[in-house]
Amino acid sequence: MFYYIILFNLILVKSYNPFFNHWHCLGFKNDIDFSRPYVVNIGDLPLVVWSDSNKKDDKKDNKLYSAINICPHMGSKLDNGKITDNGCLQCQYHGFNLTDNNQFGQIMEYQGKIHWSYKPKFVLPCNIPFYNNLKYAKSTIQIDMDSSLQDCALNTMDIRHPEYVHSGIFGFGSAQYPANIKQYDFNNLIGLEFEYTSNKIIQQFNQAKKTHNYHLYNYPSFTWSKVSFNNNNLIISVDFLPLSKFKTRWFVTICHNYCNDENGAMLINKLAWKILLDDCRQMRNQSPDTELKKELLLNHIFKDEEAIISLKNKFSEYVYPDHNEILKLYKHHKTSNNLLKLKQAKEPTLDEIFELFQ
């Protein structure tokens, strides 16, 4: 028992970025060709994902696997790896086969998306309201924004920018300030509720002058918004994936119970694209996250920006997953695996435990 107390403290010393224990969307399932390896980065963490759907025996279960996109033999990338008949990912440099023994983190499909987490803090990824309701049409959009994860997050909780950023012919922004604003802070959940008067074109499209809006940000990288009018709901959710310090991929899921035939869904999707392109232009105009920007950010505060301030304070915990953070994570992973092997072989001595942490 004494050994394990020491081990527990050693593991704490070798802790890693908790960002990796949240679920992160890697892509929409229907957009991924699982007949080949799928490669994607979470920050500077290079991952490769594959399916055992090529298996030729009765044990095929379309299981997904994830590994670091570096062959543990001689360091080749696995982008061009071959998925073998027994469901392994074979490196094309020397033929090394990656199996479930090379699994890095956990991976699952949920609500049409592929998610990854190293050691999930929660059983399931964040939920999209009404996603499973058959009365709701669904569509998706993937777009890369030239800005940091924090800038993308703050943008979603900002009620002031639509007047300026989304004020074009097909935008929804208007000069009329939102009414009945309520703001919520539930630790990792930041909420915002208000009534909004859209511009004349959107009013005509909706056959309603006002909409009731609710925004929720689930730290660190998921948000959804619900726009309601005349018993109609439009839900737009976004999973954010940091690709670099200054580039973030948005996985957007759109659900709605009006205009829910094929043509209507296409129209709603195109309108959403227009709004996202507006955001894209503004995100490209954001200053990089330098120390100077940190000092200046929210030096001026407009009224009703408590939700933005709460979210900014929450992001003080965020550490971008750079190479140093990845190295900490991998060393933790390697040490944990070595300890497990040692424990399975025999009861480890104290010297053996310490040796793992050298």
Image: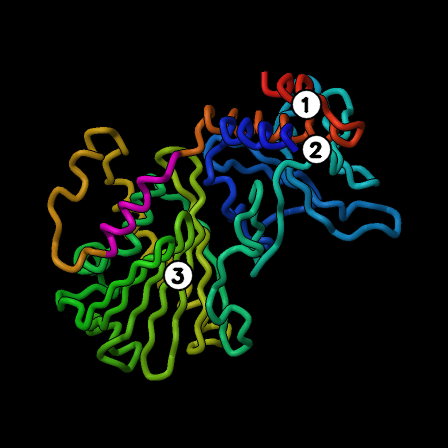
Observer-nearest of 228 and 214: 214
- Which numbered disc covers residue 192? none
The colour style of the image is rainbow
Question: Which span is picked out in magenta?
Answer: 307-319
| Badge 3 element | strand
- Residue identified by numbered label 3: 224
Q: Evaluate if marks 2 and 1 touch, with contact meaning CB atoms under 8 Å apart.
A: yes
| Badge 1 element | loop
Residue flagged by tag 2: what amino acid is it?
Answer: Asn
Residue flagged by tag 3: what amino acid is it?
Answer: Trp
- Residue identified by numbered label 1: 72
Q: Residues within 10 Å of mark 1 (few under 14, many from 20)?
A: few
Task: Indicate the quadrant containing the C terminus: top left, top right, bottom left or bottom right.
Answer: top right
Q: Earlier in the sequence, mark 2 or mark 1?
A: 1
Q: Would you place residue 163 above or below residue 12 in this image? A: below
Query: Among all residues in the image, which is located at the extreme right?
Result: 57
Q: Earlier in the sequence, mark 3 or mark 1?
A: 1
